[in-house]
Amino acid sequence: MERNKAVVVLGTFDSKGEEHAYLRDVIEERGFPALTLHAGTKAPAPFPVDYDLYTEAIAARGGLGRDEAIEAVIEKGRSLVQELYRQDRLSGVVSAGGGTGTYLCTEIMRILPMGIPKVMISTVASRDMSRTVGTKDITMMHSVVDLLGINSISAGLLERAAGAVCGMVDSNEKHRTGSTKKRVGLTMFGFITEGAEHVRRHLEALGYEVIPFHANGTGGMAMEELASEGLFAGVLDFATHELADALLDGYCGGIGPGRLVPFPGRPNPPRLVIPGGLDCAVLIFDRNHIPERYEERSIFFYDFRSAVRLSREEAATLARQLAEKLNRFGQGAKLLIPTLGWSEADKKGAPLYDPAMNRFFLDTVRKNLSSVVSIQESHQHINSSTFAEQCAQAMHAMIQNSGE
């Protein structure tokens, strides 16, 4: 197969030149063209490379501190990689590094959209990589040994990494989906899984492809990112629970300021918003270790996590925040409320059932909601198939009215 697009070998060639040269050679031996991109901040590449970010971003600017040099290389690298992608010259990217190299090269990789293979061999991959990977499909590969030249162990490791990125590129070229169905982004989490499954079936019956996201903090932000890239005809934000956890620093609270906010200058598909999980915040404690501040609250004990019913003050704050977010969408958003409960823990006989609190929340939303944002109630529980069908039909109507 003739290949026109290259695998980019990205890295700090001034400190790990041998390793990246080895990656380049193995990739080319497998029949894939390679482009070398030096992202080091200490010196020019020790051998000829296709692109030298040190020369372009640092050498001409004397007196940069280490942190400034790193940010300059990242900025230049992101611009270059993005341009290679736009020119259809890039099929994937692979890198190897320690702490700084991992940070620097994954920051550059993150400019690429989902689906472009991104492989990072890292000496620190066994640590918490949540901030490093973020919302991107970066494959982290732990080097186990440190990277200091080529030896019998590191050579095998680098060969497997080269094989991994080449295999991903090959898979992309051979197995592209031909689906022409419109996509709907769907958020979900554990307490409303049953309802989300019903929603998926009803949307699929209407001819849509459903792309689910686990509303665990990162999942919601990933959905927002892909929506901003125009991947969805509509967004059914079934699990807005992340907003509650963000308020109380809960398990799923790791969202950024872009969650449930329209994208200026980018696509904003119609959005149907459901208060899935807004009855509670999920915190890390069990029934044997209840924090004193929550001892008088209604609690649903789940596993190592527990769901705590929101107080009146917390519910009011959350309601105002939700209304403020929806107001920014204007007519592009609709709020659909199941009045019989918003999670499996919030139904008649369950630990967090409190219809009066839900009504207070809804009344507060109404007081702060713009008149152009549609709000509708349904006398159903969030996990019922009937409510799911209403959600699917409402989403369908919004997409049709938007001309998608």
Image (cartoon, rainbow, N blue to C red):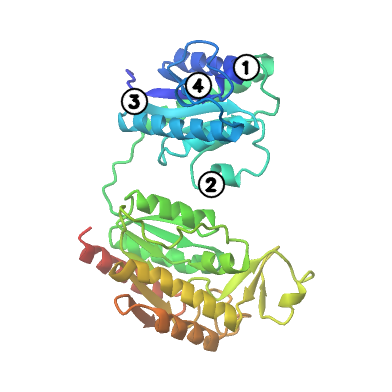
- Which mark is in front, 2 or 4? 4
Q: CA distance from mark 3 to mark 4?
A: 27 Å
- Which mark is in front, 1 or 4? 4
Q: Is residue 44 above or below residue 253?
A: above
Q: Looking at the image, tell me whether mark 2 or mark 4 is earlier in sequence order.
A: 4
Could you tell me which secondary element the residue under label 3 belongs to?
loop
Q: Is residue 98 above or below residue 240?
A: above
**Can residue 383 be seen in this snapshot?**
no
Q: Is residue 395 above or below residue 336?
A: above
Q: CA distance from mark 3 to mark 2?
A: 25 Å
User: Image check: 150 left or right of 92?
Assistant: right
What amino acid does circle 2 point to? Gly
Residue at 47% across / 22% down in the picture? 60
User: Image check: 85 left or right of 315?
Assistant: left
Residue pointed to by mark 1:
155
Q: CA distance from mark 1 to mark 4?
A: 32 Å
User: Image check: 303 left or right of 219?
Assistant: right
- Which mark is in front, 2 or 1? 2
Could you tell me which secondary element the residue under label 4 belongs to?
helix
Q: Residue 255: x percent and y percent?
A: 53, 58
What amino acid does circle 1 point to? Ala
Residue at 32% across / 17% down in the picture? 2
Q: Residue 224: x percent and y percent?
A: 42, 55
Q: CA distance from mark 2 to mark 1?
A: 29 Å
Could you tell me which secondary element the residue under label 2 belongs to?
loop
Q: Looking at the image, tell me whether mark 2 or mark 1 is earlier in sequence order.
A: 2
